Image (tube, rainbow, N blue to C red):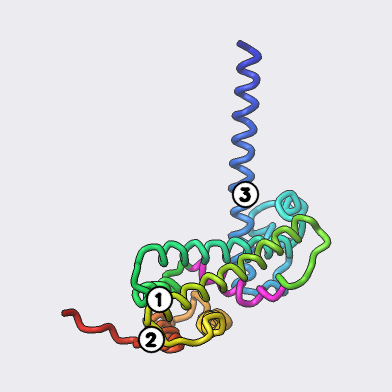
Amino acid sequence: MSSNQDVNGGRTRTTRRSRDEGVRRAEILDAAIARFGRDGYENTKWAEIADDVGIGPTALYHYFDSKQHCLYVILDEALGELHERFDAITAEHADAGEVLRALCADCFELSEREVLRNRVLVAEQVLLSGTSSSQREEQARLAGREKTRGLELAWARFLADAMSQGAIPERDPRMLARAILGLYNSIWHWYRPDQTLLLPTLSEFFTARMLAVAGMSTDRAPAA
């Protein structure tokens, strides 16, 4: 009996410790996104993130090898979530035109955290093209780089299907994907969540332009 209690107690402590570490890791990522998104990656000190979370600077290294490793994880998770949202929307509709409208609208259904993360993604995505000496850093970098390609290819495949359905004019789907994503990404170079310009206003303006780049009318056909 005592042996079983020891085993079960050990498992409980291990589970609790793992859960607590997961919570702390998420807190560090949230603090890093807020700092990087508002102050910039280069202007943020690793120790400032530790202060925001309420731990000592050396404790950060239990979770991440470096500030850059933390950045790579943020980029990887951001790209992964963007692809998940893309897949969910494309699975909801058969009509390519409706999908494209829904994708563009979803681009602006964002929390403040997601806005700041987009700012980090757009500003620092170029760092995914480098290499890292740390194994964990390199794994996160390669994962982010692969997700960048995967998301672009998913858009290109979707746009090619939209062309085959006659929803948008024929053109190079990869170039069109880059044009639409490039227009969208440009927003996060200057937009901040504390501006008086609200996301619905941003959505109304840029959704129309993204659809226009695709060659699709911004006016819905009247109901029959």
Residue found at x 64% / y 59%: 52
Q: In the drawing, does residue 212 fall left or right of residue 180?
A: left
Residues marked 1 and 3 touching at CB (< 8 Å): no
Element type at marker 1? helix
Q: Residues within 10 Å of mark 2 (few under 14, many from 20)?
A: some
Q: Residues within 10 Å of mark 3 (few under 14, many from 20)?
A: some
- Write down the region rendered in magenta: 112-127
Query: In the image, residue 108 lies at what x, y percent?
Result: 43, 74
Q: Amino acid at mark 1?
A: Leu
Q: Quadrant of residue 34?
A: bottom right
Q: What is the distance, in whole Å, between disc 1 and disc 2 at their CAs?
A: 9 Å
Residue found at x 45% / y 86%: 170
Residues marked 1 and 2 touching at CB (< 8 Å): yes
Query: In the image, residue 74 lies at what x, y percent?
Result: 63, 63
Q: In the drawing, does residue 141 fall left or right of residue 152?
A: right
Instruction: Give the residue pinned by disc 2.
Output: 216
The N terminus - image quarter: top right
Instruction: Give the residue pinned by disc 1.
Output: 100
First in sequence, mark 1 or 2: give its number: 1
Instruction: Give the residue pinned by disc 3.
Output: 24
Q: What is the distance, in whole Å, between disc 1 and disc 3 at their CAs?
A: 38 Å
Query: In the image, residue 211 lies at what x, y percent?
Result: 41, 84
Q: Quadrant of residue 217?
A: bottom left
Element type at marker 2? loop
First in sequence, mark 1 or 3: give its number: 3
Q: Amino acid at mark 3?
A: Arg
